[in-house]
Image (spheres, helix red, strand yellow):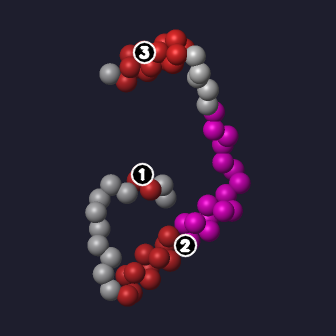
Amino acid sequence: MATSSITKNFVVSGQKQAEIFANAIEESYQESLTRTNSAPIKYRELKDPIEIKNFMEKWKETHE
């Protein structure tokens, strides 16, 4: 579970709920260590100010 998917506040109260929550976090972490089918992340490194400006203008056109 990605942390960005948590959009609500919640309260963990009591030892039993705390243990359940901690176990869920631990299981999620252990699962992430065994994942091997992750797709490679594609990225493009921009260094030239003009290239950055052009990229941002195109981004704004598609996201406004």
Separation of disc 1 and disc 2 at Cα? 17 Å
Question: Is residue 20 left or right of 43 when viewed as pictured?
Answer: left
In which quadrant will I find the C terminus?
top left
Q: Which residue is mark 1?
A: 4
Image spot of residue 52 (x, y percent): 51, 18
Image spot of residue 37 (x, y percent): 69, 50
Q: Which residue is mark 2?
A: 26
Separation of disc 3 and disc 2 at Cα? 42 Å
**Which residue is drawn at the image coordinates 49% and 13% (left, top)?**
54
- Which labelled disc corresponds to residue 62? none
Give the crowd class for mark 2: few <14, some 14-19, many >=20 residues within 10 Å. Answer: few
Evaluate if marks 1 and 2 touch, with contact meaning CB atoms under 8 Å apart: no
Q: Check residue 31 for magenta coloring.
A: yes
Separation of disc 1 and disc 3 at Cα? 26 Å
Looking at the rendering, which quadrant does residue 13 occupy? bottom left
**Label located before the other in sequence (1 or 2):** 1
Label 2 sits on a secondary structure element that is helix
Label 1 sits on what residue type? Ser
Magenta region, residue range? 27-42
Label 3 sits on a secondary structure element that is helix
**Label located before the other in sequence (1 or 3):** 1
**Which residue is drawn at the image coordinates 58% and 66% (left, top)?**
29
Question: Closer to the camera: disc 1 or disc 3?
Answer: 3
**Label located before the other in sequence (3 or 2):** 2
**Which residue is drawn at the image coordinates 62% and 68% (left, top)?**
30
**Relative to 36, residue 41 above or below:** above
Label 2 sits on what residue type? Glu
Q: Which residue is mark 3?
A: 57
Looking at the rendering, which quadrant does residue 12 occupy? bottom left
Image spot of residue 16 (x, y percent): 39, 87
